[in-house]
Structure formats: C-alpha cells, structure tokens
Image: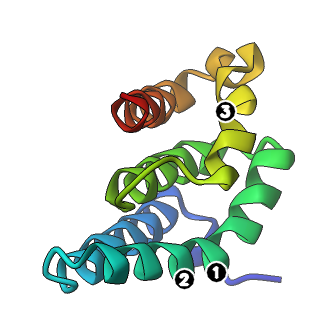
Amino acid sequence: DYPLACHSGQFIRYIFENVALIVRRRVAEQGGDAAAELRVVGETEAVLFPVFQEILNKQQEDLMAYVLQIMALLLEAAPGEISQTYIMLFNAVLAPTNWDMAGNVPGLVRLLQAYLRKGT
C-alpha cells in the first residue's frame, strides 16, 4: 500500500507538474540540437509510456488529464515528424469515451493541437 499522501489529489498534481518540468528542462538543455532533443524525448517516452499506457488502459480518470498533457508536451518537444507511437495512439485520442470525461478535455485539446502542428 502507498502512504496516504500518495492518494492526495494535490500530491499527484505536484508529481505530474514536476515530471513536466523535468521534460521541459531536459529538452531545453539540449540547446536546439535536434538529434539530442529527439534522444531525450525518446528516452523519456521509454520510461513514461509503459506507465501512461496502464493509466490510459484502466481509464484512471484522476490521472488521465495529466498523462495527456505530458504526452502533448513530449510530442511538441520532439523535433521532426510524428513518431509511430503517436500515430498508433491517434485513434484513441479521438475516442468519444475520452472526451466524455471533462477533466480530459484540456489535455486532449493540447494533444490534438500538437498532432495538427506536427502534421502540417
């Protein structure tokens, strides 16, 4: 069992905010070197995506909004074209059940915007 603090909405929010901050910082440290940025994003996705997949598959409402926003951040940060991982997730982003959860909408919108920016 996890300590009670781990179940606090505030605690969870801070954890995800810190993950987003770490991603932004690691990408910014690459100084615009596209290859290095792509490597950092790839390494980060390799660590986070198995956890994200589980959260999304289980439809954990309290965590999905954060996951979607961090996925959008990673997609925005990766130079070049949309990776195969995100192409495979695209249909899930459009699934009506995800949009039915009001908390998901901001993250879904940001992720969809990232897809559109990358695709043009």
| Circle 1 crowding by C-alpha within 10 Å: few under 14, some 14–19, many from 20 | few
Report the front residue among 42 and 34.
34
Mark 2 falls on what kind of element? helix
Which residue, given by chain and number where applicable, does mark 3 sit on? Answer: 90
Q: Position of residue 9 (x, y in %)?
A: 52, 56
Q: Are marks 1 and 3 in contact (CB under 8 Å)?
A: no
Colour scheme: rainbow
Q: Position of residue 92 (x, y in %)?
A: 74, 31
**Picture layout, residue 51 above or below residue 110:** below
Mark 3 falls on what kind of element? helix
Q: In the rendered structure, which amino acid carries the disc numbered 1?
A: Val
Which residue, given by chain and number where applicable, does mark 2 sit on? Answer: 43
Please tell me in which quadrant of the rendered image residue 101 appears.
top right
Q: Position of residue 72 (x, y in %)?
A: 44, 47
Taking the image as shown, residue 25 lies to the left or right of residue 89, namely left
**Picture layout, residue 21 above or below residue 85:** below
Mark pair 2, 3: CA separation: 21 Å
**Residue 47, disc:** 1
Taking the image as shown, residue 115 lies to the left or right of residue 30, namely right
Mark pair 1, 3: CA separation: 20 Å
Please tell me in which quadrant of the rendered image residue 13 appears.
bottom left
Taking the image as shown, residue 106 lies to the left or right of residue 98, namely left
Q: Looking at the image, tell me whether mark 1 or mark 3 is earlier in sequence order.
A: 1
Residue located 39% across and 37% down the image: 114
Q: Are marks 1 and 2 in contact (CB under 8 Å)?
A: yes
Taking the image as shown, residue 7 lies to the left or right of residue 82, namely right
| Circle 3 crowding by C-alpha within 10 Å: few under 14, some 14–19, many from 20 | some
